[in-house]
Amino acid sequence: MTELYCYPHSGGLAHQLRPLARELAPLTFRGVDYPRAQAWGSPPGSVREFVADRLRSQDATDFGEAFLYGHSLGGLVAFETALQLERRGTPAAGVVIAAGVPGDGVPRPTRTDARTCTDDELFDWSFGTVRDRLPTPADREVFAAFAPRLRRDLRLYGSYRPDGRLARTPALLLVGTDDTVCPPGAWEHWAPYLTRPARAEVKGGHMFHLDDPAATAAAVRDWRAA
């Protein structure tokens, strides 16, 4: 059965992509989480390092019929996974890069510096810019628990620069129509790294995959059927 490897956004967990995976049945969900960050500088040190370690542990896995879906940071991880799979001669069936561009492609007004910002600034950015909604008191309580992981993941995002071009793996770039973190025009930053990628928009902001998994899945299905 064809597998769907899902890579979450910064600070997120793979199980948050289960609703999307259900919409893409009969693809089999395979969630990929990043190591927990207990302190600044926890492993992995880079997206490239994380992917290399992960693929070494899956050396016997056949990705030939597998699809990779990544959102935001996960999009960079999915791309790097596809790139390393091509280099070892076992390309994936396809990769979906959703709401993510290489770190230097993120519009400056919507960036936050995970190394220097305060927890309050990071909290306000997470909800005001990324989620585009007012937080609840419960949100602030939960935030303290995942802030270290979010900081680590944002550092990984900001430092990633692709070092190659996908030549054999079909790719879909997905963006949200109202996304200020990765707006529709940002996909031009992928031009040096992808060969004739497909493009699609999903109505919504940066977290459109959580807000409307059915519409996100429809865009993926249309791409696969094309």
Image (spheres, rainbow, N blue to C red):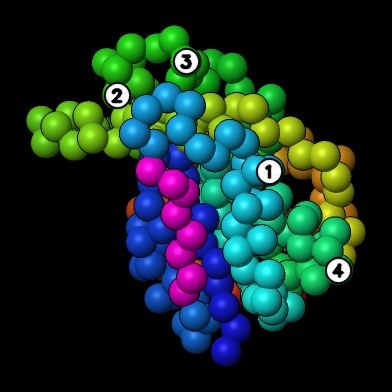
Name the secondary structure under disc 1.
helix
Q: Is residue 143 left or right of residue 25?
A: left
**Which residue is label 4 attached to?**
89
Q: Which mark is residue 115?
A: 3
Residue 31 magenta: yes
Residue type at the position of mark 4:
Gly
Residue that appears at 83% across and 64% down: 88
User: Dot 4, how many residues are within 10 Å of its Cα: few (below 14), some (14-19), or many (20+)?
Assistant: few
Q: Which mark is residue 123?
A: 2
Q: What percent of the width, then of the height, locates residue 163?
A: 82, 39
Residue type at the position of mark 1:
Arg
Query: Which of these two is toward me, 153 or 51?
Result: 51
**Region rendered in magenta:** 29-36
Please tell me which of labels 4 and 2 falls first in the chain.
Answer: 4
Name the secondary structure under disc 3.
loop
Contact between marks 4 and 3 (CB within 8 A): the answer is: no
Q: Which mark is residue 14?
A: none
